[in-house]
């Protein structure tokens, strides 16, 4: 294998709709009690731990107090998600299954995840559409507080699995937010963005995305050119 492609989940592969927020909030309330939503706070591209730290931190609590309780928050949230996430309220985005099927069938491409979701949450969301089988490696919200922290983790896991490192020019991060693009640029790897999330093409181009497409159906030919 000589190409590594790392996909984001929410807004890139699928959309969960408004159902996840209340499940997350319920878990946060159980662990941390009262908190307040930050006016204008954007969840897009943030890791699950980062979201908790920001929202609970707005109550005046220090990060050093919040971090030790993240494991309890994660456990309660994942239970909520497993019980409460309804596939009929979700949407698999255009071209996803076809593209993942073609890429994972190649012997020269390693397909993985780079997502702010905790790993258990990623598996639950992907499982609603039987997508877990396409991903051999990944980096998750369990692996770092900020998205930039995740890229070296994914690279190291990919190298361990394949017994070789992947060149930056042959590594592609695919996402839907400016933070997806930012982490790719910080790591010196290539980036592709889609506008199936909440970030428009102008902002994704301005963030430095090498390619921007309306969805993965329209990005597929460029991705296959990238690995050819």
Image (cartoon, grey):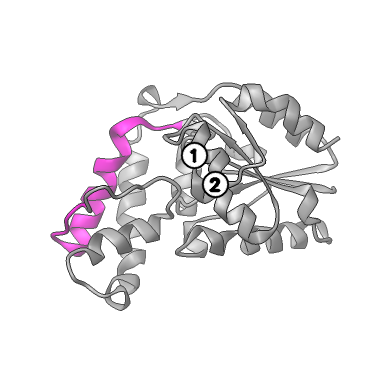
Say left or right for 75 vs 120: left
Image position, residue 72 (x, y; %) = 31, 64
Q: 63 and 189: which one is in front?
A: 189
Q: Residue at x 50, y 46 (%)?
A: 178
Q: Residue furthest left?
A: 34
State yes or no: discs 2 and 1 in contact (Cβ < 8 Å): yes
Q: Taking the image as drawn, is residue 176 in sight?
A: no
Query: Does residue 25 show up magenta in the picture?
Result: yes
Residue placed under numbered mark 2 in the picture: 207
Q: Is residue 199 above or below residue 186?
A: above
Disc 1: which residue: 203
Q: Residue at 30% of width from left, 33% of height from top?
A: 18
- Rendered image quadrant of residue 174: top right
Magenta part of the chain? 15-37
Give the x, y percent position of residue 16.
Answer: 39, 32
Q: Residues within 10 Å of mark 1 (few under 14, many from 20)?
A: few
Classify mark 1: helix, strand or loop. helix
Q: Residue at x 51, y 58 (%)?
A: 147
Question: Is 66 located above or below residue 7 in the figure?
Answer: below
Dot 2 falls on a residue whose secondary structure is: helix
Crowding near the residue tagged with mark 2, few <14, some 14–19, many ≥20 C-alpha atoms within 10 Å: some
């Amino acid at each position: 294998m000589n190409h590594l492609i790392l996909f984001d989940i929410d807004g890139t592969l699928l959309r969960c709709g408004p159902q996840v927020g209340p499940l997350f909030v319920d878990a946060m309330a159980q662990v941390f009690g009262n908190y307040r939503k930050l006016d204008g706070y954007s969840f897009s591209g943030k890791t699950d731990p980062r979201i908790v730290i920001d929202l609970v931190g707005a109550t005046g609590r220090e990060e050093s107090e919040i971090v030790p309780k993240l494991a309890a928050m994660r456990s309660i949230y994942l239970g909520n998600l497993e019980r409460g996430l309804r596939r009929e309220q979700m949407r698999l985005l255009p071209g996803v299954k076809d593209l993942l099927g073609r890429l994972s069938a190649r012997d020269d491409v390693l397909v993985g995840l780079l997502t702010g979701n905790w790993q258990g949450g990623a598996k639950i969301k992907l499982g609603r559409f039987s997508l877990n089988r396409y991903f051999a490696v990944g980096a998750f919200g369990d692996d770092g507080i900020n998205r930039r922290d995740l890229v070296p983790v994914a690279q190291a896991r990919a190298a361990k699995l394949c017994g070789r490192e992947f060149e930056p020019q042959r590594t592609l991060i695919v996402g839907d937010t400016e933070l997806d693009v930012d982490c790719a640029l910080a790591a010196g790897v290539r980036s592709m963005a889609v506008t199936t999330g909440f970030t428009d093409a102008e902002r994704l181009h301005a963030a430095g995305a090498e390619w921007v497409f309306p969805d993965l159906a329209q990005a597929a030919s460029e991705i296959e050119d990238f690995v050819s």
